Each structure stands twice: as C-alpha cells, then as structure tokens.
Image: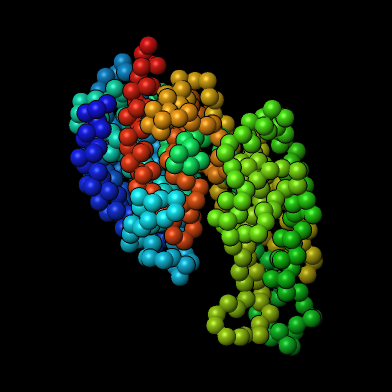
Amino acid sequence: MDAIQNYIDHNKKRFLEELLELLRIPSVSARPEHKEDMHEAAKWIQRNMIIAGVDKAEIYETDGHPVVYGEKIIDDSKPTILVYGHYDVQPAEPLELWDSPPFEPVIKETRLHPEGAIFARGSADDKGQFFMHVKAFEAMNATNQLPCNVKFMIEGEEEVGSDHLELFCRENAEMLSCDVILISDTSVIANDVPSITTGLRGLSYVEVEVTGPNKDLHSGVYGGGVANPINVLCQMIASLKDDDNRITVDGFYDKVVELDKKEREAVNSAPFDLGEYMDELQVDEVRGETGYTTIERTSTRPTLDVNGMWGGYTGEGAKTVLPSKAYAKISMRLVPNQDPDEITELFTKHFLKIAPKSVKVEVKPHHGGHPVVTPIDTPEYKAAHEAMKRAYGREPIPVRGGGSIPIVALFEEVLNVKTVLMGFGLDSDDIHSPNEHYGLFNFYKGIETIPEYFKNYAELKQG
C-alpha cells in the first residue's frame, strides 16, 4: 500500500487538474441542447480510462445518452469489482444564485472544507466521486498492486432516471458480470466521522398540469368569474399533506413498514446536532412528519415535495393575466416495500379525484426507482468497513441515505449481486443546488480508500 500512496502523493496535482477539465463539460442530461456535451463527456471518460490503464474502453450508444464501459481483467480466478458512476449532472439554474459560473470550477476554502473545495456543477454528484475510482485504479495498476479484476460502467442518465440503462444491463449482462458493485455517489457523516450508506429511498417523479379557460384572460374582466388554475393548483397541493405533515394520497402508506424501537434507536444513534443543522440551513425550526426525528424523516420515512411550480406571467413588471394553465413537478421519496409504479398510480388517481370540475387535470409520470437496503454482514460490506476504518482511523457508522440511485435495485435483479455504497461527499456539499462543491480532502481520501477496499475484498473472497 505504500507504493500506491506514494504514487497518489506524486500525482495529486495532475489528478485534480484532470477532474477540473471534466467539470468544465456541461453534461446536463435533462436538456436536449446539451446532447453534444454529453457525447464530449463520454469521449473524455473513455480517453482517461485508457490512459489510466484499462485494456478496453468503449462507448455504447443507447436511445438516451451514451454509456462508457471499461475493463481490466488480470485473472479470471480473481474477484471482479464493477464500478458504477454517472457523468451527467443536474441543470445549474438558477444561475444568478451561483457565486461563480457552474462550469468554470474554482477552489475556495469553506468552514467544513478548510483545505479547499471545488465549486462546480457535478463536482460531488457524481464526477468527482466516480473519477476517484479511475484514479485509484490507475494508482493500483501503475504500481502492480491491482488485486481484483475491474469493470467500469459510467452512464449519462442517472439524473433523469436511468430510463435506458435497464435494457443496456439486460442486453449486456454477461459483459457486466461481477462479484460486487461499488458506487461512490453518497456521503459520509463528517470528514472526521466516516459512514457507509446501507439503504436508499426510492423515487416517484411526476409533472402535473392544471387547465382552466382555453386561453389567458384579462384578470379584471374575468377575475372572480372563472377558476384560476394557479390558485386551484396551490389548493390541491396544499391538501396533499395534513396538519401532521402526513401525505394524504389514498393508500400511500399501505405498504410502509414501521421500524421497531430497536431499529429506530439504531437510526438515531448517528451523530447529529439539530442546532448545527438549522444554522447551516439558516432556518429557525425544522418541520416534517409528526412523531419522527429529523434523521428518520430524511432517511426512513417517505416524502412528497414540490420541486417546481409555474404558470401565468413571471417576467419583470406587472401583467394582469388570469392564466390558462398552471404546472408543478412533484417528487415522492419512497421506503422499502413501496413500489414506484404503484405510488405513481395512487398519486394520479388521488390528484384527479381532488380536482374541482372548474379545471382539467393531467398527471405525467417522469421517472422512478425502487428503494433498497443493503446487508452489513457480507464480505462486500466488511471490506468497505475495514477500508474506511483504516483510511479514517475510526470505525465507520452504517446509515440509511435519503436519496435515490435508481440503478441499484436493478443491479441486484439483473446481475444478482450486492452493491456497496461507499461515498465520500458531505450532505452540505449543495448537490442539486447552486454552489455545489466537493472537498479536496474528500476527493483525495476517496482515492486513498478505494485501494484498501480492493485489497480487503480480494483477501476476504480468496481466503
């Protein structure tokens, strides 16, 4: 391991420069105008995998955005680790809230990252994190210390639901065959409190459209005479939660399994300071489902949130218009036993049922994903536990994450293998928000920890 660490130390500056180059590519999967940027990012990753030492690196076209696949097979008798990541990023808007342009990365010190953090869209989610694996592989390969076969699958649609990845996985199951899948797209509790994610919530994402009159109307002439779709939409959304912040969609909680006392105590044993949490977000109080802690609300309980809402006139100045249409995007985070397709159907039926006759309502499903819980008594998890322990100097804490990675449940179904979620970001890194950033400490710590995982896993699997 000393040879690997020496290689990392001597190449840190280059590793960082390469990541900054990747971050300059605006690979926004949700926007058709960035289609060429998506291909540019895929080609960049292919080139850098080859430079890092893979024997094969190919770009696979799909009906969506490309998948980059690479591999280094050193010995068929050795275990194979499949590294999954995504090169697509969330839209950067609202641009005016960024302190620096989102695709012109800058490094600045912060309270939680005194050694510096990279501010750029995709720095933590997930370019910075998957690129750690490419560089860790390079370090192992260059020093002849690679103990396992390696496969990389870096996709371009995670932020829009990985809709075309299922077909790709099913058609290429033999190529993707492995013993474990390793993903860094999650976080640690703190830079001095390592943790390993043992569960993810699922997702149901929909867009709703409410239509009133057949055209925009003068609010003075027609106001008070016909329904205003924005007003109606606000009332409908407000009714989706009761006074205890429980979701009112019929049947929503039918399959939710309540954690027992011991399980709840385990969830709440993770270090958490509510005061610091509120200070960081600059809020005077927290709010959520009555009867549950903030940790539980953000990891083991389902949610329903409006992600965006629009309609009518939103430009400068005034325009007295009664709009014809109003829209909203709504996401629901799901917990084990909740099926995203079933929840989408329940939401659709409920939303249509509560609509007044004065408007017409349409619900458009977008994408979703199943919740997952990973076991902690397997060689795969134990290898991660020991790697984090050695790298951070203390025992990592198993935690349930609140986000979603749609592909994880599919991997288990198609490839019949478990996933290890060994992320290195912080929840405060503003992923999906303006000023997303990723600490230099976290970037380098990931590169140093990943070879430990490979070493531990090879030893556990081969005895």
The answer to whether 363 is drawn above or below residue 139 in the figure is below
Closer to the camera in the image, 397 or 229: 397
The answer to whether 242 is drawn above or below residue 152 in the figure is below
Instruction: Give coordinates of residue 381: x percent, y percent.
Output: 47, 25
Q: Is residue 261 visible?
A: yes
Name the residue rendered at 31%, 15% in the picture.
77
- Here the colouring is rainbow
Outermost residue toward the bottom in this view: 221
Name the residue rendered at 75%, 54% in the picture.
241
Closer to the camera in the image, 223 or 90: 90
Count of marks overlaid on the render: 0
Query: Looking at the figure, which quarter contains the C terminus?
Result: top left
Q: Is residue 344 visible?
A: no
Instruction: Give coordinates of residue 37: x percent, y percent.
Output: 33, 57
Q: Is residue 77 left or right of residue 33?
A: left
Q: Quadrant of residue 53?
A: top left
Name the residue rendered at 46%, 22% in the picture.
382
Instruction: Give coordinates of residue 209: x percent, y percent.
Output: 65, 64
Query: Looking at the figure, which quarter contains the N terminus?
Result: top left
Outermost residue toward the top in this view: 463
Instruction: Give coordinates of residue 237: x percent, y percent.
Output: 71, 60
Q: Is residue 351 left or right of residue 435?
A: right
Name the residue rendered at 35%, 50% in the picture.
115
